[in-house]
Amino acid sequence: MTEINLDKIGLRVGLEIHQQLLTNKKLFCNCRPLESDEYVIRFSRKLRATKSELGEYDPAALFENRKSKTIIYYANPQSSCLVEQDEEPPHEIDLDAINIALIIACSLKSSIFSEIHTMRKIVVDGSNTSGFQRTMLVAQGGYLDVEGKHVGVQSLCLEEDAAKLIKDKETERSYSLDRLGVPLVEIALEPVDVSPSEIKKIALTLGRLLRITKKVTRGIGSIRQDVNISVMGSGVVEVKGVQQLDQLEKIIEYEAKRQHGLILISERLRNLKLEKVLKNDVFDATELFRSCNSKIIKKAISDGSVIKSIRIKNFAGLFSYEPYEGIRLGKELGQLVRFYGIGGIFHSDELPNYGIENSDIQRLQKLLEISSNDGFIIIAGENSKIDFAIDSIIKRIEDAKNGVPAETRGTTPSGETVFLRPRPGASRMYPETDIPPLVITDDQIKLAKTNIPKSWDESLIDIQRKYALNAQLAEQIFDSEYLHLFEKICLDKRHSPNFVASILCSTITNLQRQGLNISLLKPEDVLKSFELLSTNKIAKESIEIIFESIMSNKAKSVEEAIKKSAITSLDETKLNMILDNIIHDNIKIIMRDGIRSLAPLMGIAMKELRGKVSGEQVNQLLEKKIQDLLLDKNKN
């Protein structure tokens, strides 16, 4: 296996950014966009795919429909109403959201339409109670300036955000309605022939353009990148929901390698001139495997599943053929069936294994009437699901002969991608009949143009000057999700902006890198911690302890974190007593090393005093005590 050369495989990448807008209400009702963990309303739905105006079904909607999941919705009256529950028609469009979208369009020099029509986009995965998402095309064309190079803009849409996924089980899926209906802009850029690192730069530039408007939200989930990737002119694969820019390069590199690997696999398949897999190549093998010793097979049969096998002539070795490490057709098929509630497949290239023995394989080969040159797949599942999964497997094997199928994929924490569903088609979109067209006036466009914000460079200089930050720290806080929180904390002049920026950009990031969950740390927790610091109820060092406790889920609130971490403020008498004891216990080290003993004694002191007294105060007091002791010694 060789390493891939991204410069020689015709890599093309198109970026789509979805950014929530900072408004006081949702797009089609007066509810405030607030997220909560408490829900007093619960209801369920079954969503079904519907035909388009031309009588066609969207392939992505059909795929979701086959899963036949029950959708459970949780709602809080503070953040959702009958509109989100699809029990009431949408209200008038929020004009603030329209005006923000126009400002962004003008910033990108896009051509704004004089009349905006709301459309329904079919979505039956449960993320919209109605079975569709409302979206409107606001502008087309224009460009993004990336270090002097122009990246074209395809379109700018204003749409409602989806519900937030809470749980996803085999038979049901749960969402909260807090986020449903929050206005967001979708900006699609033209595909470009660039490296993954350049795409990251493009995404960063577009994110900065949005943030300098100060009219978009910050925080986890408020901005999402979708990436459209193709190599060598193959089918376009859309990778959904990349939330971190650091992930972007890894995902593009992996997907480029996967797609080029599939092209190499397709070349091998075409050279063999394989026969098409048909329905009569599928066999029921349940009875054959009743005596099998495989724990997986035994459990499947005891759970009432059927065991079926698919024969594929002259396919030996092709499931496991690996042009690049981890890129195999067998892996693709295994990912595919999981979306039908089936755990995976066994294929002939990996057997005997998993408790399936040679004797089982020989009996199966006899049933399928195949030789060792042929391949086969074993799949177990419920009668209601298994045939859908088998149809998908047969289609995917056929598609493998043509290279890369156009599909939608998700991301994993390791930077790989996994199959989600087929790519949607044109039949998913149709007009919204409950909302009249919206006329955009020349005055609105003129107002939007006058509100185009300063450039990113100018905005960065403003932050540096206002808060006396160095260039690096100013850039970090501006690019982070915490700029609004930073400015709110710094309204209290008792806080050093440098210290606040360091906590928000470095301390929280370091805790996240240790594997702690940043989503558990709420903005109100951060504000509360700095409020306690400003009133001298906690020391500076306590903030990291509090955040660590909350992000590790040891505490649900700042108060609980303080209690569990035994954070208390010490009076000067108690502090002096502790330091005097440390001096007494380490007098030999002090006499031997003099003032150099400060460092090891600080380590001892902070083990006991961390979170109770500031390190700066301890250092100053301990240094004075050591100096006084050494001075007394010299006098004697």
Image (spheres, helix red, strand yellow):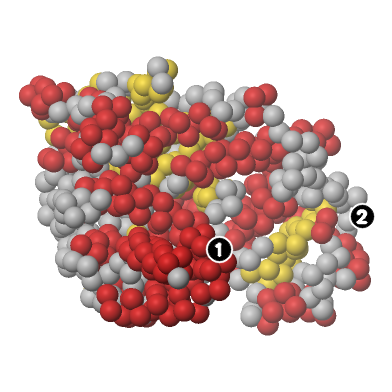
Q: Nearer the viewer, residue 338 or 399?
A: 338
- Residue 291: tell me if it is visible: yes
Q: Residue at x 35, y 34 (%)?
A: 471
Where is 260 relative to 532, above or below? above
Q: Which residue is mark 2?
A: 371
Q: Quadrant of the N terminus?
A: top right
Amino acid, disc 2: Ser
Q: Quadrant of the C terminus?
A: bottom left
How far across and how far down the image is residue 124, in percent?
39, 55
Q: Residue at x 71, y 33 (%)?
A: 4
Left or right, 588 with reference to 144 = right
**Residue 150 at x, y percent in the picture:** 40, 18
Looking at the image, residue 343 sits to the left or right of residue 204; the answer is: right
Left or right? Give the position of 453 relative to 356: left
Give me the residue at 86% from left, 50% from top. 316
Please determine whether, in this image, residue 107 is positioned above or below residue 229: above
Q: CA distance from mark 2 to mark 1?
A: 81 Å
**Residue at mark 1:** 593
Looking at the picture, does residue 152 appear above or below residue 301? above
Q: Secondary structure at mark 2?
A: loop
